Amino acid sequence: MPQPTDDEVLRIFRESEALLTGHFVLRSGLHSGHFFQCAKVCQRMDKVTRLVELLRPRLAAHPCDTVLAPAMGGLVVGQELARQLGARFVFAEKENDRLVMRRGFTFAKGERVLVAEDVVTRGGRAQECLDLLAAAGATPVAVASLVDRSSGQTRFAVPFVALLELSFPTYPADKLPPELAALPASKPGS
């Protein structure tokens, strides 16, 4: 269901040239004719600040002590969420293509943690963060994202709160429509 803020959010993405069209290979391995390059929005902290201001009220039912973001995509969003919520900010990094906690970041038993992402398609990195929290004995309160590309299909064991639910079709590599297959594929990064 469209939200009253959807037009403003889409305008911010378009002004930032973050909503791209073409042929893209997503981190999930799926192909799409659209890509959210949130890094373009994250170049401008005024835009990130505004997007998080719009997201923050939707998180009121999920208070946290800490915000955890997967590197790279969730870093700027997670840090701004933590700033606006008055919470601690930490991030997980890739090691052998899996997220791990490094740099001395730890969690106390029962610490309430919000997982922050920029875009969720299948939710793989957010789920890895939830797994890290479970292993540490922390308490995940929700997953927050600027964009839910899953058409509301992605589910976690905690609430999933997105600023914008917007889905474009995705395809396995062996089932591309002809118009998409005709374009060279690029992997812009996630």
Image (cartoon, grey):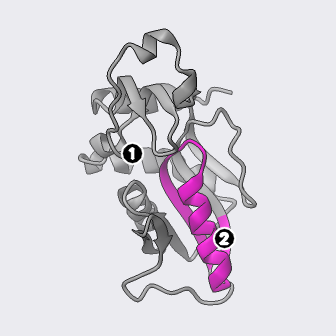
Q: Is residue 135 above or below residue 117?
A: below
To which quarter of the image does residue 61 belong? bottom right
Q: Is residue 91 above or below residue 173?
A: below
Which residue is found at the position 39% from the left and 45% from the top?
50
In the image, which residues are magenta?
112-141
Image side of residue 10 versus residue 165, left or right = left
Instruction: Choose between 178 and 92: the one closer to the eye.
Output: 178
Residue found farthest to the front: 174
Q: Is residue 145 above or below residue 91?
A: above
Q: Of label 1 and label 2, which has the lower sequence position?
A: 1
What secondary structure is marked by label 1?
Answer: helix
Image side of residue 35 versus residue 136, left or right = left
Instruction: Choose between 32 and 146: the one closer to the eye.
Output: 32
Q: Which residue is mark 1?
A: 50
Residue found farthest to the right: 157
Q: Which residue is mark 2?
A: 140
